[in-house]
Amino acid sequence: MSRYFFTLFTSLCLLCFPPFSSAFSLDDLSNKEASSGLQAALERGAGNAVGKLGVAGGFMQNEKVKIPLPKVLEQAVPILKMTGQSGRLDELVLAMNTAAETAIPLAKPLLVKAVKSMTFADAKQILTGGETSVTEFFKAKTAAPLAEKFLPIVKGVTSKSGLATKYNSAIEKVGKFTHVPPEQATVEAYVTQRALDGLYLMIAEEEKAIRADPIGTGSKIIGKVFGLLK
């Protein structure tokens, strides 16, 4: 077994089976740092993504994650113009993105919790998987609980801003002419899903940046772990 694969294997083992002794050899210390490096990379990527999105303009001013009108409304713009609703469309877009920006900070504690609950199988998949394995890990661990947390926050913002009324009014008119998919039937469900999509997209961007230039993160631990994988 090459030194590279031996180091990788022992690093994975130590993630879930740390030695009982408080005395470490130099090799053990190196492996312990590698374990810490993986966790540091996960927390850094998640923290940066939340930090960029959970602020004013985090969604609205980022074309990669900006929440557009649902397709059913986009397709129905001519109908909405006929019914005098087109002037509200820009307000809808702004309010939806504001709601997502308000909800996103709730994600950080759950993302950190996911890192701390990482199993041997999770670690192996992250270290040996593709360039978005970190993102897939977070999505599998947090998508359902985050949707549950986001929904009432989004609902509170949309209700306060009047977005729910505007959205439902537009959907009701459109529904008379075309089928409205269930996931677009309420503004809360639509914004919650798009907020999650945006969060995981930004985590993926952070992950790719770490993998491409681990030394550039400024963290020796992250550089060491992900440098081995280049």
Image: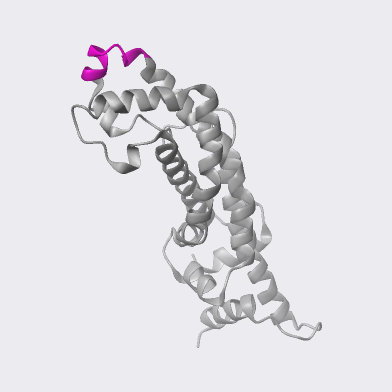
| Coloring applied to the structure | one colour
Residue 26 x/y as whole percent: 74, 80
Main secondary structure along the magenta-highlighted residues? helix
Q: Nearer the viewer, residue 35 or 118?
A: 118
Residue 225 forms part of the magenta stretch: no
Q: Nearer the viewer, residue 73 or 225?
A: 73
Q: Is residue 223 visible?
A: no
Q: Nearer the viewer, residue 127 or 192?
A: 192
* Depicted 105 relative to depicted 83: above or below: below
Rendered image quadrant of residue 176: top left
Rendered image quadrant of residue 23: bottom right
Q: Is residue 211 visible?
A: yes
Residue 183 x/y as whole percent: 34, 42
The mark total stands at 0
In the rendered view, does 156 fall on the left or right side of 96? Answer: right
Residue at horizontal 54 percent and vertical 40 percent from the top: 152
Residue 14 x/y as whole percent: 64, 79
Residue at horizontal 59 percent and vertical 33 percent from the top: 55
The residue sitting at the bottom extreme is 1
In the rendered view, does 220 fall on the left or right side of 171? Answer: right
In the rendered view, does 129 fall on the left or right side of 73? Answer: right
The residue sitting at the left extreme is 177
Residue 84 forms part of the magenta stretch: yes
The stretch in magenta equals 78-87
Residue at horizontal 26 percent and vertical 13 percent from the top: 83
* Depicted 19 relative to depicted 185: above or below: below
Residue 80 x/y as whole percent: 26, 18
